[in-house]
Image (tube, helix red, strand yellow):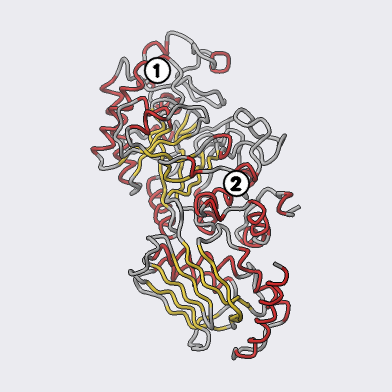
Amino acid sequence: MIKKTLVVAMSVLLVACQNDEPPASTQAVSQAVSTQTRLVPYPTSISQSAGHFTLPGEIKLISDKNAPDSAAAISALLSQLGIKQGQNDNAVIRLELDPSLSLGDEGYQLTINQGVQIKAASDTGLFYGVQSLRQLLPAKQHEQYVLPNLQIEDQPQYAWRGSMLDVARNFQSLDYLKQHIERMASFKLNKLHLHLTDDQGWRLEIKSWPKLATVGGSTQVGGGPGGYYTQEQMRELVEFAAQHQVEIIPEIDLPGHTQAAIASYNELACGYVTESSVQNQCKDVVGDARLGLYEGTCVGFSALCTSEKPDLTYRFVEDVLTEVAAIFPSKYLHIGGDEVLNEEKSSFAGFITQVDKIVASLDREVLAWEEASAGDIRPSSLLQLWNDNYDIQPALDKGIHLVLSPCSYTYLDHGNYNGQPETYTWCAKEGIPLERVYSLTPENYTQAVGVEGAMWSELVRDGATADNRNWPRLAAIAEVAWTPKEQRSYQQFTERLSSLRGHLDQLNVQYHKEPQLNWQ
């Protein structure tokens, strides 16, 4: 391996005189030889040849008018690096749509050889090619940018490469969500699952039920101001995400995890709620306050009243989901469906079946947590697997596919290391370190559509903590979902990711300083 690297380095030096630009420094050329190792997620195919290309202070950019998102991305990258756009025919970056490429909608071809060419069948593919180019370049401005001659052909293994943010337990600002989307896009993550409602907060304006936001959104875990997003803000976020090739999946958790809704509209509760205290494991922490706002962390005590008030319950659900569908163009509406542990357990399966019909009437598909398999949902639905021990086979037999979020691999509210303060241990007593996340093998699930990291927020009260829990572990999620198993190596992954610290710094990520990445 050392001999091969030396040969390549010598070859690069020999052809340096062929470029019209001033000779690159020996250090810059040496760095160029190794830049292919910086890519996360690692591409499907990469080949490097002798020679290099030096980006000068001014380049000529040729992009396709039908690919505005990738054009905006490359322009932003050039501006970040202080490279001007002009008419330098000796230094051309070309973004080209080529429908004949057989790399799928998200695949791309990146060629560096006396210029930079990115080809793809879609704007999304070109955008991801730009993200790879971004990682090959330094994060900060330099006097010169030396790139190795190489060719990459790349496409994702899975279509679903996700990050879930729980903004219900503790609220996050719209600006933070935009920052998170930019960070996701840089690692080719493409699904942002927003957990918008729970016992502790309702975070989305619903005009037909306005108190959901004004009352239900007025607090959070431990108290505090809470907050909610207007429909206009969410439409703005949807557009911003789309420009970064990220689809937003809204979750309205039903029929459980609904205390914020019940506190907003007491009529949604069953009569027995006013007559008795909680009868399950939450009794001591909830007590008799079953109609008010909740600021604790127990789960499983609340539910909509399907058993006594089906007409009101389903009208409420239909009103809410109709407005949600009008805001979010995603094919999927996440309906929650987990942890109904109270008196409504007996009506749970029927509820899920009925809500699936409502979702179908909106021309959408159901996405739900694994427990929703108890209902009669369409085979086109998706279930999100979170419990390592749950028997999902009956759903698989129906042809239903899975989003993989097994808690012992992907629950990012657990520690980056054993004993990390303010983290959970209920699913993984020693935390979920980076190597554990990377060891997830989605190929073991024949009906998986992809992987999603879940960041629950009972113990995550601000953006800095959210960053610490998500990064760098979301980079591991990205590679596990993008790169085929036979090309994944944890040692090589850490070597590549360690060199991308500057890119995370440039994105203002307050990441965990992972020792295995030498980020102390």
Q: Residue at x 59, y 83 (%)?
A: 56
Separation of marks 2 and 1 at Cα, in angstroms: 36 Å
Query: Which residue is at 64% across, 90% downward?
Result: 17
Quarter of the rendering containing residue 509? bottom right
Please name the residue shown 60% across and 70% down the image.
Answer: 137
According to the picture, the residue beneath numbered tag 2 turns out to be 438
Residue 166 screen position, x and y as percent: 51, 39
Q: Which part of the image, by quadrant, shows the N terminus?
A: bottom right
The residue sitting at the right extreme is 520
Residue 345's tag is: 1
Q: Residues within 10 Å of mark 1 (few under 14, many from 20)?
A: some
What residue is at 58 percent from the left and 62 percent from the top?
A: 39
- Residue farthest toward the left in the current orientation of the protein: 361
Measuring from the top left, give residue 379's x and y in whole percent.
Answer: 30, 36
Whichever of labels 2 and 1 marks the residue nearer the N terminus, that label is: 1
Residue 245 vertical placement versus 386 (above, below): below
| Front residue of this view, candidates 315 and 449 | 449
Left/right placement of residue 49 relative to residue 92 reads right
Task: Give the amino acid type for the residue marked by disc 2 in the picture.
Answer: Tyr
Which element type, helix, strand or loop, lies under badge 1? helix
Q: Please determine whether, in this image, residue 331 is positioned above or below residue 389.
A: below
- Please say if 378 is above or below 289: below
- Nearest the eye: 18 or 486: 486
Q: Position of residue 139 (x, y in %)?
A: 63, 67
Along the viewing direction, whichever of 85 and 107 lies nearer the viewer: 107
Question: Do callouts 2 and 1 mark residues in contact (Cβ within 8 Å)?
Answer: no
Q: Farthest residue in the top direction?
A: 275
Q: Residues within 10 Å of mark 2 (few under 14, many from 20)?
A: many
Given residues 430 and 277, the one toward you in this image is 430
The amino acid type found where label 1 is placed reads Lys
Q: Nearer the viewer, mark 2 or mark 1?
A: 2
Q: Secondary structure at mark 2?
A: helix
